[in-house]
Amino acid sequence: MSRAGAALVAPLALLAGVAAAQPSPLELEAGVAITSPLLVDGNGTRVRLSPAPLVGISLAPASWRAGRVAGGVTARISTATVRLEDDGARWSGGRAWQGELLATATLSRRVRVTPHAGAGVAWLGGDADVAVVRDVGRRPRALVEGGVELRRAAGSRTALSLVAQGYRITPAGGDAGGVLRVLLALRHAW
Amino acid sequence: MRQAGFALACTLVACLAATGCRAPTVPGEAPAYDPTTLTGGVLFAWPLGRAISVYVQGESRSPDPALAAAVDRALAAWEGAPRYGELRLRRVDDVRRADVVVRAIGAAPLVDESACGGGIGEGAGFTVLCASGDTARTLPLLDGGTSRVKVSVVVDPGAMGGSLDALVAHEMGHALGVTGHSADAGDVMHVSPAVSRPSARDGRTLRYVLHQPADVRL
């Protein structure tokens, strides 16, 4: 397993281990992420990511609850194809992945609509021979997110999750800008 | 529900503010030198994202090992110049699958190089490519087979004082669309290059060529 892969799997394994060791609320999620352009080149090329399947795991121990707010940690990983566009031409730039680790604050799950906010770090990497992926990979970057979970009934274990998250990239020789992702996922609590 | 919607709207605005609302950018690049001086201002360019296949011919019709190795090094060097994988370069072992043919000057040509009435450059090497309207002319195979060859590169391995790598890298630059010469001897596209790999200036010029509207599509 590559070092990058180990770095991503380790937190997931840790979370699963903690959950197995004590009766703590654990949630799994699976969904898709849509990402804004990673880079716009003045020569005309736009670097985008395809819709990215994602999986994630969240842990919110009862001891991290304060009133109606539950603290937790979330780890996610997603993978996408790098898509390049220039003046009508389109081609693939290989595969890229994003891993995230966040601390979250969620309002009580005993209602049908539960907002949450989170902050953490994201890593972007891949086998793409695309400059922006090469430039920014392996360095964690600050990530913020906010979202809601929608349940058919209050207290239901299954929820539809809609999340918006953002981070900044500074490409080599270029100007920093923001990347916005929208995540749509199904979450299920154990 | 209204409170949750308001909370979501606030977090979306916060995310947008945090990300700066503008995608990361890099500035466009001007060429380091005119890439069209040898074709009278006409820009030849390959389609973006295209895999370009190169066949290396030897004097006995099988690939010359030294020439093939020099071509491999040149392809690897030039492939690193584009920023976004605009060109993928690979060597093939069948001339019928080739877009570019490279031969030593002593080898009998496999394609009809006279179809273009001459080539770019002279002396140690030259590159044959020409237009048929707004697309590059396909050079016919002399055995009558189906050809997709657009460019023929001819090099004299005995010239250049033994710097075959420099000669091949230079001619491959022409084959990729840099149909001009640099005045800087530190660039591989100098008429007598002192280097055997494309410089940063050569890379910038190739990237410029790749992203301009082509006068002639290769």
Image (cartoon, grey):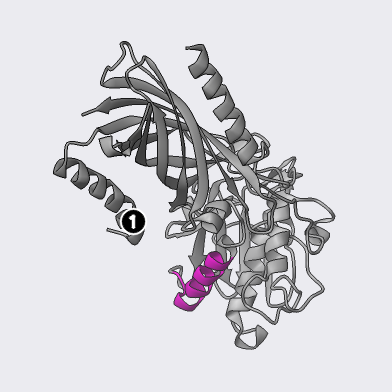
**Secondary structure that dominates the magenta span:** helix
List x then y, in percent, for residue B77: 57, 68
Q: Nearer the viewer, residue B206 or B26?
A: B26
Task: Using the image, name the chain to which the residue with label 1 belongs.
Answer: A
**Any part of residue B18 in sight:** yes
- Residue at 32 percent across and 18 percent down: it is A110
Whether A31 is drawn above or below A76: the answer is above
Q: Amino acid at mark 1?
A: Ala
- Asked if the stretch drawn in magenta spans residue B64, the answer is yes
Residue A167 appears in which quarter of the rendering?
A: top right
- Residue at 60 percent across and 33 percent down: it is B14
The magenta segment is B63-77
- Asked if the stretch drawn in magenta spans residue B105, the answer is no
* A152 with respect to B22 (left or right): left
Q: Nearer the viewer, residue A119 or B163?
A: A119
List x then y, in percent, for residue A190: 20, 29
Q: Local crowd at mark 1 within 10 Å, few (<14), some, or many (≥20)?
A: few
Q: Nearer the viewer, residue A29 or B201?
A: A29
Q: Nearer the viewer, residue B157 or B142?
A: B157
List x then y, in percent, for residue A31: 36, 29
* A146 with respect to A67 (left or right): right
**Any part of residue A85 in sight:** no
List x then y, in percent, for residue A150: 38, 17
* Outermost residue to the front: A67
Which residue is under mark 1? A7
